[in-house]
Amino acid sequence: RDQPRREHNPQSNRPFPTMSQMPPQWLGLLRWSLKYNDGTKPSQVAKPMSAEDQKFLETVMKELVVDENQKMRAAITVLKIPDPPSKETKTTATKEEGGVVEGKDAVMAELEALDAEEQEKPEEIVKKEETLEMLYDIVDNGPENAENFIKLGGPDPLLACISSDYPSIKRLGCQLVMSISQNHQKNQVSLLSKGYLQALFKLLRDGGDDGETLGKAIGATSALVRGCKPGEEAFKKAQGLVWLLKALDKNGNHPRRVTTKSLGLLRHFIHTDSKAVPFLVQLQAPKAIFLRSADSNIDIREQSLEMLIELCKDAAVAKKAKQGLVAAGAKAQLETRAKAVADLISKGDEDEKEMYAVEAELIKELQKLLG
């Protein structure tokens, strides 16, 4: 990761960090960017750098002074480099993320496969990965950096990254989108106007079994639309609520991050959009959410139970929500789970008793609401 930033104080005579004080990966990135466009790459791979970008990088190398805006602009020139043709990539999920990797031999086989994949990556992709990680560090350092990234022309090449054929570039691109747009309406509107919601929805639709990319995509989508009225309306219009429910109704095949982010965004709409709640109940949202109340992760179970309690207490939809849960066999399943949790509490140590106590109370409250 990048080294701590030295702030430039207008009242002092201390300059911005010089090139010699920059992390070596930045200096290497600048040199590589210029070398990449020196005419030695095959024309079908390399796209000539614009004269403006070329002059900027040469000036930075000559003056040996770099502030954060210059670093971002240099990084953006790297993002503009087109991806080389990709080989079909198969992503392997870890056990925690919903995969089936078990046993020492299986783990070693996965590590060897990942190492082989890294070794085969084209140089351009490796450099783009480094660049996206560096940009995330800078943008995460302050909201003004996110705004400046947009002013410096970053959105267009970043949009190409989340549409890349390389999963690692998609994921890192989504991570950067999340950092740029989180709780920043001006940035959200800027990215929405560039077509980011459509690109992210394509990732959600076409993600298949690549749970890690799906998780990053739903995280970026949530950050892009939450708290931004135009974004929320566009999300609903694009049937985003339907997709969230489908993401929950996957019999545990999606990774934890997808489930958590989907529940979180659904809960946001339940809390802030009274018109969306009846629509969600009509789509059998209580049933989809109830499936996750049996998740292997206790945080997801508690979040699901809390949401169901909220729906069953909402005067506008309580009756239909309860009917849907009863029809789905919730009463019997809650009774079974209540007994299992009580058993865990009676046999567990103090930490386990405390951990399961909240779930036990939530189950009890939902049972009371269902009658």
Image (tube, rainbow, N blue to C red):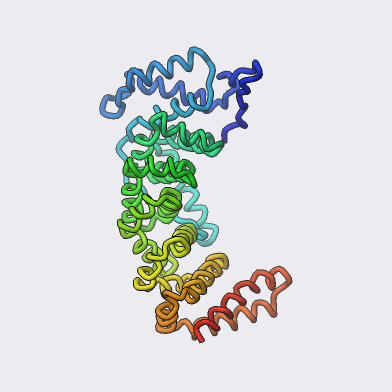
Q: Nearer the viewer, residue 285 or 37?
A: 285
Q: Is residue 253 left or right of residue 24?
A: left
In the image as oriented, which residue stretches furthest toward the left?
Answer: 44
User: In the visual, does 37 lie left or right of 115?
Assistant: left
Residue 339 picture quarter: bottom right
What's the residue at 43%, 23% (across, down)?
32
* Residue 103, above or below 197: below
Q: Is residue 258 toward the left or the right of residue 37 in the image?
A: right
Residue 122 x %, y %:
38, 35
The residue nearer to you, when weighing 35 against 68, is: 68
Q: Residue at x 53, y 79 (%)?
A: 366
187 or 221: nearer the eye?
187
Position of the N terminus, as image quadrant, is top right
Rendered residue at 42%/34% (across/down): 150
Q: Position of residue 324 (x, y in %)?
A: 40, 80
Q: Is residue 67 visible?
A: yes
Q: Is residue 49 above or below residue 190?
A: above
